[in-house]
Amino acid sequence: MNNEDHDIESALRRLRPRPPGPAVVSAIGRALDAPAASPSARGVILRWSAGLSAAAAGLLGFLFFTRAPVTAAPEYQLVRAEQPPAAVDVFAPVRLADGSFARPVRVRWSNETQWEDRRTNTRLINYSPSEQFGLIPMETY
Amino acid sequence: MNDAHSEQDWRAWFAEHGARLRLIARQWTRSDADADDVLQEAFVRFWKHQRHLPGNPNALVVTSIRRAALDLHRRTDRRALREQVVSADAAAVADFAPEADPRLQALASSLPSLSTEQREVVVLKVWGDLTFEQIGAQLEISPNTAASRWRYAMEALRRLVTARTYE
């Protein structure tokens, strides 16, 4: 930087920029005086969210700790045991590999048992279907 | 958080520096009203979020002004170009108080004749008290480019002031 540049810079520093308008000064003064009085929209949302979350957590805690106590193990008693008649399907005779004949038979049945806990009026049902397939040898004359 | 400027009277600080900060804001805005809005928003934003930070607050406030001006530009990008042209003429003398010294008055009148790039470097160096490194960071240019713009600006101002003084 030469002397002429320095002179120009010194002269520039002597210039007096126009101050900001009174509205700006008063608005800044208000902001500095009451920083918490006018929270931003984001701040309002955050505070409401935090408040609602705390209320929800409190409600859940209240419900958790005040609900009816549950007894220990259930007490089931057998109230029903059924085995309906089996269904038997007999099919047409078939010829086996050794040249003999046999009749295919399919037998289907089911077992059902029911237990009940009278205190809680709950019922446990066990249903187990079964199927068996077999060949009845046939004698030919 | 530790408040590095807990004893600072920020109202007094703004009263002392508000004029030069407004001039800086004016470089990046299209009108005086926009400059006032940007300055207000930038200073309040700095005061709320950055006044606790250590060091000289000047560079932080200038950065805040720059960001607020860019935000305003994004919001009002579709505004008429007419405003920009009108404000460029009107800003010539209005940015500075009248000077009795004709050379100073010529200097104030010559500043708007600089290119936008040169003028913002001059304003940031003289009234922003920033180094070329800091100016480069603000304008996203190299310090050498900032220094080069400064030299060209000084040369142009010297010519303009000489011409205007002897008009």
Image: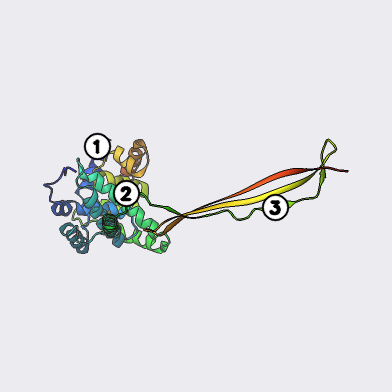
- Is label 2 in a helix, a strand or a loop? helix
Q: Which mark is residue A3?
A: 1
Q: Is residue A36 placed above or below B136 in the rendered structure?
A: below
The CA span between labels 1 and 3 is 119 Å
Q: Quadrant of residue A29?
A: bottom left
Residue type at mark 2? Leu
Residue at 32% x, 45% y: name it.
B121
Q: Nearer the viewer, residue A30 or A51?
A: A51
Residue at 12% x, 51% y: name it.
B9
Q: Quadrant of the C terminus of chain A?
A: top right
Query: Label 3: which residue?
Result: A88
Query: Label 2: which residue?
Result: B160
Residue A78 screen position, x and y as percent: 45, 53
Parent chain of label 2: B
Residue type at mark 3? Val
Residue B111 screen position, x and y as percent: 30, 51
Q: Residue furthest left?
A: B7
The CA span between labels 1 and 2 is 17 Å
Residue type at mark 1? Asn
The CA span between labels 2 and 3 is 116 Å
Dot 3 crowding, Cα within 10 Å, few <14, some 14–19, many 20+: some
Dot 2 crowding, Cα within 10 Å, few <14, some 14–19, many 20+: some
Q: Which mark is residue B110?
A: none
- Is label 3 in a helix, a strand or a loop? strand
Residue A52 screen position, x and y as percent: 29, 59
